[in-house]
Amino acid sequence: MAVQYAFRLMAPNQQKVPDEIYSHLKEAISHWGMNNTVKARQALEAAVQLADETGVL
């Protein structure tokens, strides 16, 4: 599941992702926890798009 992967990316033992991407991942996890899957998906898509645009992917 994408949200679980996002949560693992944010672990302290992982290489830190850029702050703006981190913010989208944190938002996705928060929305997922509130059972708002639509907003969780939007936040994940925003994180992936930004990561692609900035060369993180």
Image: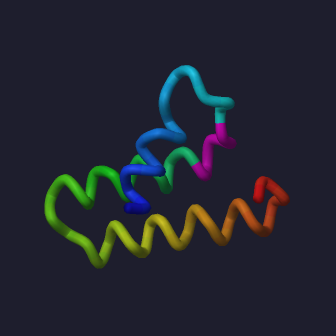
Left/right of residue 19 with respect to residue 35 in the rendered view: right
Residue lying furthest front? 1
- At x 41%, y 47%, the residue is 26
Identify the image quadrant of residue 55: bottom right
What is the image's colouring? rainbow
- In the picture, the quarter occupied by the C terminus is bottom right
Residue lying furthest bottom? 38
Give residue 13's position: percent from left, percent from top.
Answer: 57, 21
**In this orientation, which residue lies closer to the viewer: 54 or 1?**
1
**In this orientation, which residue lies closer to the viewer: 1 or 18?**
1
Left/right of residue 27 with respect to residue 54 in the rendered view: left
Residue 32 sits inside the magenta stretch: no
Give residue 15's position: percent from left, percent from top.
Answer: 68, 30
Residue lying furthest top? 13
- Number of disc labels: 0
Looking at the image, residue 7 lies above or below residue 46: above
Looking at the image, residue 31 lies above or below residue 38: above
- At x 68%, y 65%, the residue is 50
Residue 20 sits inside the magenta stretch: yes
Give residue 29's position: percent from left, percent from top.
Answer: 33, 52
- At x 47%, y 50%, the residue is 6
Provide the major secondary structure of the magenta segment: helix
First to last magenta residue range:
17-21
Identify the image quadrant of residue 1: bottom left
Residue lying furthest right? 55
